[in-house]
Amino acid sequence: QVQLVESGGGLVQPGGSLRLSCVASGSIFSINVMAWYRQAPGKQRELVAAAVSGGSTNYADSVKGRFTISRDNAKKTAYLVMNNLKPEETAVYYCNAEVTVVVGGGPHEYDYWGQGTQVTVSS
């Protein structure tokens, strides 16, 4: 079983910053992708940023230049630094990981989600 636990959400004023963390635990062989998604009330969940094990990253156009995703592979942790936050970015932020586990003697890839952390941008 693999678990993802997010932390770091909260209330921040417009223009402020937050750092989210996501720690993966369990029977993990490797983590291929770690990503952050967000879902605002009444809207679909959307990709914010992703970091691949090889080091490449990609971002939603709306956050480029303001958000930074990083990984500490030894700690099985992903971070999302969010700067210059806007009220419309109020949402629940979810960590997602594509994980390889060994089951029945062979590798299998599964997708896991964290429980989400609330980010509220308001004055």
Image (cartoon, rainbow, N blue to C red):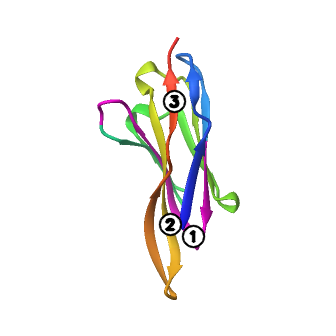
The one nearer the camera, 72 or 113, is 113
Residue at the right extreme, as displayed: 74
The residue carrying mark 3 is 119
Left/right of residue 21 with respect to residue 51 in the rendered view: right
The x and y percentages for residue 89 are 43, 27
Residue at screen point 40% across, 32% down: 62
Q: In this view, does 34 lie to the left or right of 72?
A: left
Q: How crowded is mark 2: few (under 14 residues within 10 Å), some or many (20 or more)?
A: many
Residue 73, percent across and down? 65, 60
Mark 1, residues whose alpha carbon is within 10 Å: few (<14), some, or many (≥20)? some
Dot 2 or dot 3, earlier in sequence:
2
Q: Which residue, as the protein is rendered here, is positioned at the far bottom? A: 105
- Spot occupied by residue 4 in the image (x, y as percentages of width and height): 56, 54
| Disc nearer the start of the sequence (3/1) | 1
Count of numbered tags: 3
Name the N-terminal-most of marks 2 and 1: 1
Circle 3: element type: strand
Question: Disc 1 marks which residue?
Answer: 30
**Amino acid found under the numbered disc labelled 2:** Val
Disc 2 and disc 3 in contact, CB within 8 angstroms: no
Q: Main secondary structure of the magenta part?
A: strand
Amino acid type, callout 3: Val
Mark 2 and mark 1: Cα distance apart in space: 6 Å
Dot 3, how many residues are within 10 Å of its Cα: few (below 14), some (14-19), or many (20+)? many
Which is closer to the viewer, label 3 or label 1? Answer: 3
Q: Give the range drawn in magenta.
A: 21-43
Please name the residue that numbered disc 2 is placed on.
99
Q: Picture coordinates of residue 79 (x, y %)?
A: 60, 45
Q: Residue type at mark 1? A: Ser
In contact (CB < 8 Å): disc 2 and disc 1: yes
Q: What residue appears at the point 58 percent right and 70 percent down from the top-left corner?
A: 28
